[in-house]
Amino acid sequence: MKVFLKHFVALFLLTVMFSFAACNDTDDGSYVAPITTYEKIKGDWKLTSVKQIDEVAKANSQSPSEMVLTSQFDFSTFTIKLNVDANNEPTDYAVGGNAPAIFAKAGYWKLAYPFPSTDGAASIIYLYSDAAKTAKIGELAITATPGATDVLELKLTRKTKGVAFVSYVYRLSPNVNE
């Protein structure tokens, strides 16, 4: 019984010592805010390709439903600069180059939500004509966000009475020349 009691007391003391050791708080640094989509897409972008999609033909499984426009209409000169302030909040944007103006060449922008969607839906960029961001002039869907690769893909869809009839998909890479 004495041996059992010694072993029991020793086991109890070890358990208590490990319990106190496990109670230490781990200091893993200060809070860091999550990365927003603004941080990923801000800056200067140049076109690598642009594709026009006939949404009606695509919906009806007709061919051709897509056409690459990169080498046509001077799209190869297309650039876009998405500006943010010191807090990574969106300010204005400017489109450069001689490509046809499919959407306004300058204005203001913001995202519908500053973080990636948890359901996989595309993030939406709202385009505005005024700094107060009250006069919306367009929308762009972000279909690819820079991450493992430095690719930003924007999709502009034209609709009539709520039905999409044509889309333009801009594939962009960082513009290191600026």
Image: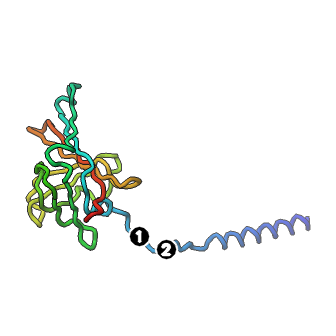
Q: Amino acid at mark 2?
A: Gly
In the depicted structure, whether residue 86 falls above or below residue 161? below
Residue 143 rendering spot, x and y as whole percentages = 29, 47
Residue 164 rendering spot, x and y as whole percentages = 15, 37
In the depicted structure, whether residue 64 falls above or below residue 116? above
Report the colour scheme.
Answer: rainbow
Q: Residue at x 24, y 49 (%)?
A: 154
Describe residue 172's horizontal placement relative to residue 131 as left or right: right
Q: Amino acid at mark 1?
A: Val
Q: Residue at x 72, y 72 (%)?
A: 17
**Displayed quadrant of residue 65:** top left
From the image, tell me which residue sits under label 2: 29
Is the C-beta separation of discs 1 and 2 under 8 Å? yes
Residue 41 rendering spot, x and y as whole percentages = 29, 59
Please give the label number shown on residue 155: none
Q: Secondary structure at mark 1?
A: loop
From the image, tell me which residue sits under label 1: 32
Describe residue 98's horizontal placement relative to residue 20 as left or right: left
In the depicted structure, whether residue 107 falls above or below residue 31? above
Q: Return the residue nearer the eye: 153 or 34.
A: 153
Q: Return the residue nearer the eye: 106 or 177.
A: 177
For the C terminus, give its image quadrant.
bottom left
Q: Residue at x 17, y 65 (%)?
A: 92
**Displayed quadrant of residue 26:** bottom right
Residue 37 rendering spot, x and y as whole percentages = 31, 59
Q: Secondary structure at mark 2?
A: loop
